[in-house]
C-alpha cells in the first residue's frame, strides 16, 4: 500500500516526467555510426553539389550524417579519409546521407523522420588543380604550369566532418577540440556597440562557413574590462585569429575620396568558381625558392548605385595617361593599410560602373604556401565585404587551441572520475546508514541530478566542458549533502518533540539557506576572470536549482514513505 502511495506521489511523478523528457531530449544512441558534417566550405565541390553547413540551432543528433561514399559504408573519419584519398579530376562522388531536412532553394524543409539524400559531387579542374611555377630551360625563365595534385582534392571537396555524436549534448572545446579566443575592444564601448560587435562576429564566422560557434560577452568586474569570448570547435588557432581579430574596415579610394566601404555599399560578392579565383589564371604566381613566392587572387563584386555614382564623380575629371589608363588608381585599404591598387581604364572615366573586380596578393616561402595564403586572404576579404567592419578594433588577449585527441582524453578521464566518485559516495553512504533502503535512493537521486543537468544543457544548447563538469560535481555533491541532512533530520532529529514531518521541514529550511548562499557565491564567478568560469558558475546554479525544485523533494517523499512503513 505504501509503495503504491509512493508511485502516486506528485513529487515522484514530477521527477519521473523530467527524466523521461531528459532521455527524449538527449537521445542517447551508442550505436550511432557514420560521420557528421560540421561545415561545408563555400565554393567547394560539395557546396556546388548542394550540400550545406548545419545551422547553429541544429542539435548534434539532428545534423546531416554521411553514411556512404561511392557505395562504401562510412563509419568513422578514417573511413571517410580513405574513401576520398584517391580522387582524381572529373571523378564524381555519390555521397549518401541521413538528414532531418532538405534544402528547397534558400529554405529548409524538415522531415519527421530522417530522410536519405544523395549528392553527385564532381571534382572539376578548378577544384582539383593548382598553378605551379617551374623553370623552363628553353625559355630561360619561370613559367606557370597547371599540374594535377590529388593531395589537394580532398581539401577542395570542402567537407569538414567528425565522428557522429552519440547524444544531443554539445561538448565544449576542452572535450571536442578547437580554439578559444579572448578579445578586448581597444576602447570602451557601450552595451549596444558590444551587441553589434558580437552579432557581426557571428555573421562573419557563419559566412566563413564555420559552425559550432559560441560568441558571448564577458566582463571583469575587478578590472572593469569588457571582453568577447569566441569558441569554435574543430578549427585551428591561426584561422580563427585572422577572422575575429581584425576590425575589417574595408575602403576603396580614388585619391583621397572614398568610393565604397565593405557592408552596405556592396550588393553582391561573387564566391562561385566562374567569377572567384583563389589564384587568378591571368596573373598566376611568381617568385623563386630564394626570395619566396607571390600569387594573386581576384573576384568580382556588385556595387550599390550610390557607390557607382561616387566612382563616376571621382573619375570624371581625371587625366588619361599611358594611352588607356586614368591618372589615379582605385586603392583598396583594409584596416587603414593599403592591400592593393587597380589601374582604371579610360573607358570607365565618368561612368557609373556597378560591376568591378577585386584582387589582392598571397605570399609564402613555398609556392603551395603562397597559393594557400592567396585563397585564405580572398576568403577573409570576401567575408569583410559581406559583413562590413566592426565598430572598434579588437585586441587579441589570449588564444588557446586544444587538439581533438587531447579533448577525447579529457572526456575519458572526466567520465572515469565521475564513475569513481559515484562509487566512493555510494560506499560512504552505505557505511554511514548500513541500510540499502536509504543508500539506494540517495544514489538514484544523485544520478538523476546528473541526467537532469545534462538534459538542460542539451535543451538550451549549452556546451559541456571541464568547467561545466566541475560544476556538475559541485552540484551533485551539494545534493548528496542535502539528502544526508534530510535523512538525519527525519530519522535522528535533535528535537525529538517534533514529529518527522516537522523535522523534514526543518531540513528544507537548512537546504534553502545553503541554496541561496551558494547562489550568492556563484554570482561573482559568472563574470570573474573575464567570464572564463561562467560554465562552472552556470552549471552549478542549474544543478542546485534542479536539486532544490525537483530531486530533493522527490527524495524527501521517499524518506517519508520509508518512515511511514517502519
Image: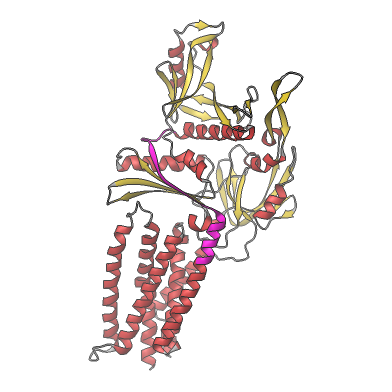
- Range covered by the magenta-colored residues: 388-413
Q: Nearer the viewer, residue 274 or 224?
A: 224
Q: Nearer the viewer, residue 118 or 321?
A: 321
Q: Is residue 136 left or right of residue 394?
A: right
The image shows residue 280 at horizontal and vertical percentages of: 62, 26
> Is residue 171 visible from the viewing direction of this image?
no
Residue 532, above or below 1: above
Q: Residue furthest bottom?
A: 566
The image shows residue 146 at horizontal and vertical percentages of: 71, 29
> Is residue 364 visible from the viewing direction of this image?
yes
Q: Quadrant of residue 198?
A: top left
**Any magenta on residue 313?**
no
- Report the number of numbered marks: 0
Residue 405, above or below 554: above
Determine the residue positioned at 48% across, 67% down. 22
The image shows residue 11 at horizontal and vertical percentages of: 38, 77
Q: Quadrant of residue 10?
A: bottom left
Colouring scheme applied when the structure was drawn: secondary structure
Residue 196, above or below 352: below
The image shows residue 560 at horizontal and vertical percentages of: 36, 86
Looking at the rendering, in which quadrant would you find the C terminus? bottom left
Determine the residue positioned at 36% across, 91% down. 564
**Any magenta on residue 403?**
yes
Looking at the rendering, in which quadrant would you find the N terminus? bottom left
Q: Is residue 430 left or right of residue 208?
A: left
Q: Residue furthest front?
A: 290
Q: Nearer the viewer, residue 276 or 359?
A: 359
Q: Is residue 114 left or right of residue 71?
A: left
Amino acid at each position: 500500500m505504501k509503495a503504491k502511495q509512493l508511485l502516486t506521489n506528485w513529487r515522484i511523478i514530477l521527477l519521473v516526467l523530467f527524466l523521461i523528457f531528459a532521455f527524449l531530449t538527449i537521445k542517447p544512441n551508442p550505436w550511432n555510426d557514420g560521420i557528421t558534417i560540421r561545415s561545408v566550405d563555400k565554393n567547394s565541390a560539395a557546396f556546388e553539389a548542394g550540400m550545406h553547413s548545419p545551422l547553429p540551432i541544429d542539435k548534434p543528433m539532428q545534423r546531416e550524417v554521411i553514411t556512404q561514399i561511392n557505395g562504401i559504408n562510412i563509419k568513422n573519419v578514417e573511413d571517410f579519409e580513405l574513401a576520398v584519398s584517391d580522387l582524381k579530376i572529373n571523378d564524381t562522388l555519390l555521397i549518401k546521407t541521413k538528414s532531418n531536412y532538405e534544402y528547397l532553394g534558400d529554405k529548409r524543409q524538415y522531415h519527421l523522420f530522417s530522410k536519405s539524400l544523395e549528392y553527385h559531387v564532381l571534382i572539376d579542374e578548378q577544384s582539383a588543380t593548382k598553378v605551379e611555377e617551374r623553370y623552363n630551360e628553353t625559355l630561360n625563365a619561370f613559367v606557370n604550369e597547371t599540374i594535377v595534385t590529388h593531395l589537394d582534392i580532398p581539401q577542395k571537396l570542402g567537407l569538414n566532418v567528425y565522428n557522429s555524436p552519440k547524444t544531443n549534448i554539445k561538448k565544449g572545446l576542452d572535450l571536442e577540440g578547437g580554439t578559444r579566443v579572448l578579445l578586448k575592444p581597444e576602447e570602451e564601448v557601450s552595451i549596444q556597440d558590444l551587441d553589434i560587435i558580437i552579432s557581426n562576429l557571428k555573421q562573419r564566422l557563419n559566412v566563413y562557413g564555420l559552425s559550432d560557434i559560441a560568441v558571448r560577452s564577458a566582463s571583469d568586474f575587478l578590472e572593469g574590462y569588457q571582453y568577447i569570448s569566441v569558441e569554435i570547435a574543430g578549427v585551428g588557432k591561426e584561422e580563427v585569429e585572422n577572422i575575429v581579430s581584425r576590425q575589417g574596415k574595408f575602403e576603396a579610394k580614388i585619391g583621397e575620396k572614398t568610393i565604397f566601404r565593405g557592408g552596405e555599399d556592396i550588393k553582391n560578392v561573387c564566391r562561385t568558381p566562374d567569377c572567384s579565383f583563389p589564384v587568378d589564371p591571368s596573373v598566376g604566381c611568381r617568385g623563386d625558392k630564394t626570395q619566396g613566392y607571390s600569387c594573386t587572387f581576384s573576384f568580382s563584386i556588385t556595387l550599390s548605385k550610390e557607390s557607382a555614382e561616387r566612382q563616376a564623380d571621382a573619375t570624371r575629371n581625371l587625366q588619361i595617361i599611358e594611352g588607356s589608363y586614368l591618372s589615379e588608381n582605385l586603392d583598396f585599404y583594409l584596416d587603414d593599410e593599403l592591400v592593393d591598387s587597380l589601374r582604371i581604364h579610360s573607358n570607365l572615366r565618368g561612368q557609373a560602373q556597378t560591376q568591378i573586380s577585386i584582387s589582392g596578393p598571397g605570399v609564402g616561402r613555398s609556392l603551395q604556401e603562397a597559393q594557400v595564403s592567396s585563397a585564405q586572404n580572398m576568403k577573409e576579404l570576401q567575408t569583410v565585404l559581406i559583413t562590413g567592419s566592426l565598430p572598434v578594433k579588437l585586441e587579441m588577449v589570449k588564444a588557446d587551441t586544444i587538439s581533438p585527441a587531447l579533448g577525447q582524453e579529457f572526456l575519458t578521464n572526466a567520465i572515469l572520475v565521475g564513475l569513481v566518485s559515484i562509487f566512493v559516495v555510494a560506499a560512504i553512504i552505505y557505511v554511514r546508514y548500513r541500510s540499502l533502503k536509504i543508500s539506494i535512493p540517495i544514489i538514484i537521486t544523485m544520478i538523476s541530478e546528473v541526467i537532469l543537468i545534462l538534459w538542460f544543457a542539451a535543451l538550451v544548447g549549452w556546451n559541456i566542458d571541464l568547467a561545466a563538469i566541475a560544476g556538475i560535481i559541485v552540484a551533485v555533491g551539494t545534493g548528496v549533502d542535502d539528502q544526508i541532512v534530510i535523512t538525519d533530520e527525519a530519522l535522528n532529529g535533535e528535537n525529538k518533540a517534533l514529529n518527522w514531518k516537522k523535522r523534514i521541514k526543518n531540513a528544507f529550511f537548512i537546504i534553502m539557506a545553503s541554496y541561496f548562499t551558494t547562489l550568492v557565491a556563484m554570482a561573482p564567478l559568472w563574470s570573474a576572470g573575464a567570464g572564463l568560469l561562467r560554465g562552472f558558475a552556470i552549471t552549478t546554479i542549474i544543478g542546485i536549482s534542479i536539486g532544490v525544485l525537483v530531486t530533493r523533494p522527490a527524495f524527501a517523499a521517499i524518506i517519508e514513505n520509508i518512515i511511514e512503513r517502519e
